[in-house]
Amino acid sequence: MKPLDPASFKIGEAGKNLNLQSQGNARNVNLAPGKRYDVRIGQPGYELFERTLTFDKPAGPNDLVKSILLSPTKTVAKPAPNVASSLAVQSAPVTEKADESVFENLKRGEAVRLDNVYFDQSSYILRAESYPQLDKLVKTLKMNSKLKIEIAGHTDNVGDARLNQYLSENRARVISSYLSNKGIAKERLVPKGYGQTKPVAANDTEENKAQNRRVEFVVLEN
């Protein structure tokens, strides 16, 4: 093992990042018992570390310093190109594919789940891998000038209901801001958070909870 100075080190509570003090490879922060904290550490060449920590009682001497181990990123060798297959593909007739870069057949009142929109855990920080699907929505809105949508944020029932409501509202606002920055008029976007009030599945398994943590757009006018 060797000490690392991580490129990214975040500790958050209720969607807000806490201020950290650096001392060499260590980070210092004051944490209160009875609260839930989300820890996210990133370092090139290592797997992303994400954990939720809860302290049920005041820290003892052994809890003042925590060492976190990062796992090296696994590299997979790329297979050698198959020349015969490549030639076959190039010589095959080209067929035009349907345009998959827009949402089609939208109906008023319909809710469309954005399956590829991601946020940092318990946060409203939008991840870069969300951009392609949001750009697809931007293109859809630009192609249909009459389209007006509600951006609906939803959570599961884990944690405080008020914090879940706050989180869902801010996630909806972040997506609305992304769309407006891409040239969509704000009058066509209605961000709204529902917290844990509109589950699509029972919150009894991790899979069902994941279904309830979602962002949708609802067609208001078309």
Image: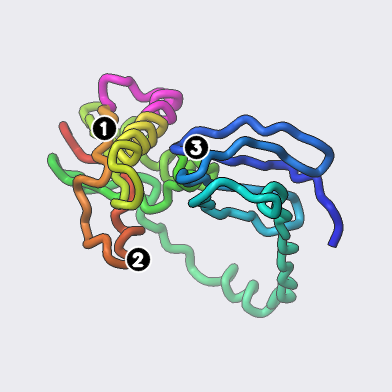
Please, what is the three-letter code of the amino acid marked with disc 2?
Glu
Residue 132 in sight in this render:
no
Q: Quadrant of residue 91?
A: bottom right
Please, what is the three-letter code of the amino acid marked with disc 3?
Ile
Residue receiving disc 1: 192
Alpha carbon separation for disc pair 3 and 1 = 17 Å
Magenta residue check for 139: no
Q: Main secondary structure of the magenta part?
A: helix
Residue range corresponding to the magenta coloring: 176-189
Alpha carbon separation for disc pair 1 and 2 = 24 Å
- Sequence-earlier tag: 3 or 2: 3
Q: What residue is drawn where x is 75% and y is 63%?
A: 72
Residue receiving disc 2: 207
- Secondary structure at badge 3 equals loop
Residue 39 in sight in this render:
yes
Q: Quadrant of residue 5?
A: top right
Q: Is residue 9 left or right of residue 97?
A: right
Alpha carbon separation for disc pair 3 and 2 = 22 Å
**Residue 171 percent coordinates (x, y):** 38, 36
- Sequence-earlier tag: 1 or 2: 1
